[in-house]
Amino acid sequence: MAPSPPSAPPSRRLRWILLAVGTLALGVFSVLVAITLGPANISLVNVRDVLLNHLGVTDVPVKASKDAIVWEERLPRALVAAATGVGLGICGAVMQSLLRNPLADPFVLGISSGASTGAVVVGVLGVGGAALGLSGGAFVGALVAFALVLFLARMSGGSTDRVVLAGVAATQLFSALTSFVIFAFADSDETRGVMFWLLGSFEGVRWNDVALCAAVAALAAILCCWYAFVLDAFSFGNSVASSLGVDVRRVRLALLVGTALVTAALVSVAGAIGFVGLVLPHAARLLVGPNHARLIPATALIGAIFMVWVDAVSRVAFAPTPLPVGVGTALVGVPAFIAIMARGRRA
């Protein structure tokens, strides 16, 4: 059971609550506005009417085409984007604490490259295609990569540094396997489709994807908030965490496995989306500080807003051809990360 953190003064607690409510409202507004963006002319009034109609609150006449665009296409896409931002952002914050490495993110465990290999094996070679599909293959590949990382880390001593090195080795291995399969077996059409998925995409997501991503993101948020005080202890090293009564080996393994499962599930739906888990925890620390009881919710909210807007802009920037979401996150994330590093150096 996780130790309980000390309580904050009432005035400070109220300030954080108001900030959280305001950020949550901004996130809801971002989702609603993102739904209106696209080639079809959809207004906020249309979005309101469609949502209230499907919720059974009203029965306002809406064109069938607009209803389908809002309810079947853009709303699921925005919600999956938000859930992906929440999950990857939280996983990044956890990884940076567990590994005590500011450059750690969910993909340092080789999960992204393993998912890419799994997707390519299914999509190009057709292995288990009928039973797994592209997302299923990506999930299996991610788990195989993480299992390899745990094996390599355990064989070399199991320290946090060894976990990072094992993740780097697994990333390079599975990236090479992905490139080999594409080069040796894929035709031009298959290569284009697979590469678009590898760069990250929310194209074609449906309500079952919303249910999966939302459940995974919510589970990650609850688990990490529960272990917030433990993550604070890990930030100061294993010896400090152990002196505070934390079972370092068991808790670290549980959080690493949970992070891997969350990342694998999200990557299997959205593809490889980088820089979310790396940059957003640093941005949240600038706003709320390093305390994980505040950092985890702040990272989740910032991640949701960030991904919704990146997806919306990527969808309309080069319409009718959408820009892969992973490209959008890199174009925004790299300058943001440079700015954060420069700010830290001045501090």
Image: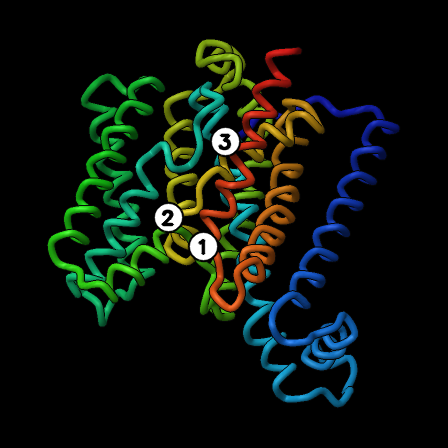
Amino acid of disc 1: Pro
Residue at horizontal 33 percent and vertical 34 percent from the top: 109
Q: Amino acid at mark 2?
A: Ala
Rounded to the nearest whole Å, what is the CA distance between mark 2 and mark 3? Answer: 15 Å
Quadrant of residue 23 within the rendered picture: top right
What separation in Å lies between label 2 and label 1 (alpha carbons)? 19 Å
Q: Between residues 62 and 341, which one lies in front from this camera angle? A: 341
Q: CB atoms at circles 2 and 3 under 8 Å apart?
A: no
Left or right of 65, for residue 183: left
Question: Residue 112: percent from the left, percent from the top?
Answer: 34, 43
Residue 235 lies, in percent from the top left, at: 52, 18
Q: Is residue 224 toward the left or the right of residue 64 in the image?
A: left
Residue 247 placed where, x, y %?
A: 43, 21
Residues packed near mark 1 inside 10 Å, few (<14), some (14 to 19) or many (20 plus): many
Q: Which mark is residue 324?
A: 1
At a point 55% along the width and 76% down the height, the residue shown is 72
Q: Which of the numbered marks, if any, corresponds to residue 94? A: 3
Between residue 22 and residue 217, name the one nearer to us: 22
Quadrant housing residue 58 = bottom right
Residue 65, picture quadrant: bottom right
